[in-house]
Image (cartoon, helix red, strand yellow):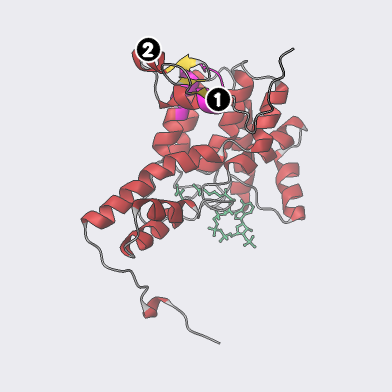
Amino acid sequence: GKVRAPTHIISTISDDRGEEPCYAGVPMSSIVEQGYGVGDVISLLWFKRSLPRYCTQFIEICIMLCADHGPCVSGAHNTIVTARAGKDLVSSLVSGLLTIGPRFGGAIDDAARYFKDAYDRGLTPYEFVESMKKKGIRVPGIGHRIKRGDNRDKRVELLQEFARTHFPSVRYMEYAVQVETYTLSKANNLVLNVDGAIGSLFLDLLAGSGLFTKQEIDEIVEIGYLNGLFVLARSIGLIGHTFDQKRLKQPLYRHPWEDVLYTK
Ligand code: ACO
Ligand code: LMR
């Protein structure tokens, strides 16, 4: 009989062999003719399925909210310095992207992992936060450099408002809010940040849509899909900062001596 030669690559998300490319089996003409948006394309290429409108709208809101947060944050700062050193678009972009990690923008996956584990094990917010403290781990998704209990992050409020109106269940988000209530009782800067809001709400999206098995949810959380939302979103802003610096013909950046403590 026929023997299939072994392939060197396996791919399951897209196919370019036919007359038109397909994303998770959906041809490009349907994507365009049926008015799909970026949220639908992310659903197809990341989750390999079409998601209901409230889910794709939520994904698009995350992308819009995280697209930029001004020139002073780690990522934009790096991009601006790199663009001013005369580097090209891709170099300026990746220099900003490389700052995304556990402290800045890349805490979404860990927030989802820790909130899920604590909620599923039935830990009270007190037990969860104190157990993290004992392990010497900062709670991912909690804390911000400039946001405070009396100066909340509007982005978090907008995400919560959307989810409360459209999601069938927001139990992980409510748990994250209870954790925030406890951490705020310890210090005023320990707010639920945008990473924590997206991490907890994405758990609700995955668990509440009824479209993912428990095993699929565990895999998504374990592999860590969710930082991808911040990386994708912030690329929009970092590209904008690169163009801005080039348009303004800004010279090479050098940090002022006065702002450095030279000491032994
Ligand atoms: N969990 C528990 N305690 C915390 C946390 C936290 N997430 N964040 C701060 N603290 C406490 C600690 O006691 C800390 O003291 P330590 O340095 O001895 O650990 C104290 O608050 C002061 O912390 P600072 O370092 O001054 O806080 P800073 O303002 O520099 O940090 C940051 C802000 C980096 C966001 C921090 O809160 C943190 O690491 N959070 C977890 C990671 C996270 O969620 N990052 C995403 C932020 S949102 C975004 O980037 C889009
Ligand atoms: C951001 O979205 O970049 C911020 O929340 C981080 C910051 O330092 O403001």
Which residue has dot 2 on it?
A: 34
> Which three-letter amino acid code belongs to the residue tagged 1?
Ile
Question: Residue 174 vs residue 43: left or right?
Answer: right
Which of the image's four quarters has the N terminus? top right
Rendered residue at 59%/24% (across/down) = 12
Magenta stretch?
Answer: 44-59
Is residue 50 one of those drawn in magenta? yes
Which of the image's four quarters has the C terminus? bottom right
Rendered residue at 48%/43% (across/down) = 231
Q: Which mark is residue 76?
A: none
Which residue has dot 1 on it?
A: 13
Label 1 Cα crowd, 10 Å radius (few <14 / some 14-19 / many 20+): some
Residue 197, x across and y down, in percent = 54, 37
**Secondary structure under badge 2?**
loop
> Which three-letter amino acid code belongs to the residue tagged 2?
Gln
Label 2 Cα crowd, 10 Å radius (few <14 / some 14-19 / many 20+): few
Is residue 200 one of those drawn in magenta? no
* Mark 2 in CB contact with mark 1 (< 8 angstroms): no
Residue 134, x across and y down, in percent = 77, 54
Foreground: 180 or 250?
Answer: 250
Q: Is residue 241 above or below residue 41?
A: below
Mark 2–mark 1 distance (CA, rounded to whole Å):
20 Å
Question: Residue 67 vs residue 17: left or right?
Answer: left
In the image as oriented, which residue stretches furthest toward the bottom? Answer: 264
